[in-house]
């Protein structure tokens, strides 16, 4: 996966063999992604790279992240449970996604047309981050570390696979990750665990 922000906008995320080729999904949506990037910067967000994608932060809080696919590209909000969605533009990533958390674009020109709406939604999310407001924890779920929550928010495929796991398998990942003392270790473990989660396995399964 990439670690330099400019690589995403010129080559892609580095997750598949279409990286740095004209067939990369980021090339298909280059104008829309560039416009989204500028809107996020205009909103005062700090640009970083996480999980191979552009991630925009306020203070130490993740606010939104980009994703590009064959059929669309997306602006996904962290802490989506807080978003009010007055314009009804947020969609769920998949059938197992708990809250509508993304704006989906199927035309690069949509971004410019929706600039005012996007900025208003970013301002709402920034205000929550500024105030330190987070969604209430789901008591039915094991205590997931922040790094895993953020990774699931950033990776729709991983989120769907994780939520499809049995409760015991989800718990195995929570226990393993929570045992790590520092965020860097938890993040590196999540990257290594990704293929197992996609395969429907628990942390200790081969």
Image: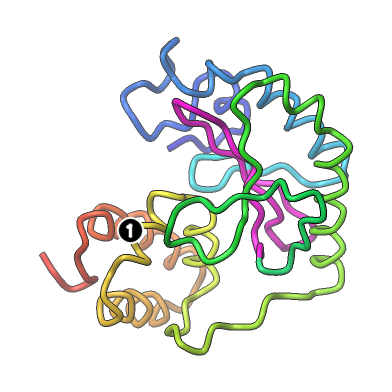
Position in image of residue 104 (x %, y %): 61, 38
Mark 1 packing: few (<14 Cα in 10 Å), some, or many (20+)?
some
Quarter of the figure that contains the N terminus: top left
Q: Which residue is mark 1?
A: 161
Determine if the magenta segment contains residue 41: no
Q: How many marks?
A: 1
| Picture quadrant where residue 83 is located | bottom right
- Vertical position of residue 169 compared to residue 37: above or below: below
Which residue is painted at 48% across and 35% down in the image? Answer: 2
Position in image of residue 85 (x %, y %): 76, 56
Which residue is painted at 82% across and 34% down in the image? Answer: 39
Which residue is the extreme one toward the left?
206
Front one among 171 and 11: 171
Task: Report the side of 166 relative to 71 (left or right).
Answer: left
The span shown in magenta is 55-80
Front one among 42 and 163: 163
| Picture quadrant where residue 58 is located | bottom right
Front one among 61 and 79: 79
Position in image of residue 175 (x %, y %): 35, 82
């Amino acid at each position: 996966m990439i670690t330099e922000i400019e690589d995403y906008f010129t080559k892609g995320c580095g997750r598949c063999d279409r990286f740095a080729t004209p067939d990369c999904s980021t090339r298909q949506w280059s104008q829309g992604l560039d416009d989204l990037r500028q809107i996020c910067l205009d909103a005062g967000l700090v640009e970083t790279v996480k999980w191979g994608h552009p991630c925009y932060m306020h203070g130490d809080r993740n606010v939104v992240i980009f994703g590009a696919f064959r059929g669309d590209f997306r602006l996904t909000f962290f802490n989506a449970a807080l978003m009010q969605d007055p314009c009804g533009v947020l969609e769920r990533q998949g059938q197992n996604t708990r809250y509508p958390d993304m704006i989906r674009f199927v035309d690069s020109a949509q971004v410019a047309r929706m600039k005012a709406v996007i900025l208003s939604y970013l301002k709402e999310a920034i205000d929550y981050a500024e105030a330190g407001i987070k969604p209430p924890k789901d008591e039915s779920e094991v205590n997931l570390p922040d790094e895993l929550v953020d990774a699931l928010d950033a990776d729709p495929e991983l989120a769907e696979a994780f939520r499809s796991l049995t409760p015991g398998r989800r718990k195995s990942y929570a226990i393993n990750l929570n045992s790590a003392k520092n965020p860097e270790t938890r993040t590196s473990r999540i990257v290594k665990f990704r293929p197992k989660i996609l395969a429907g396995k628990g942390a200790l399964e081969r």
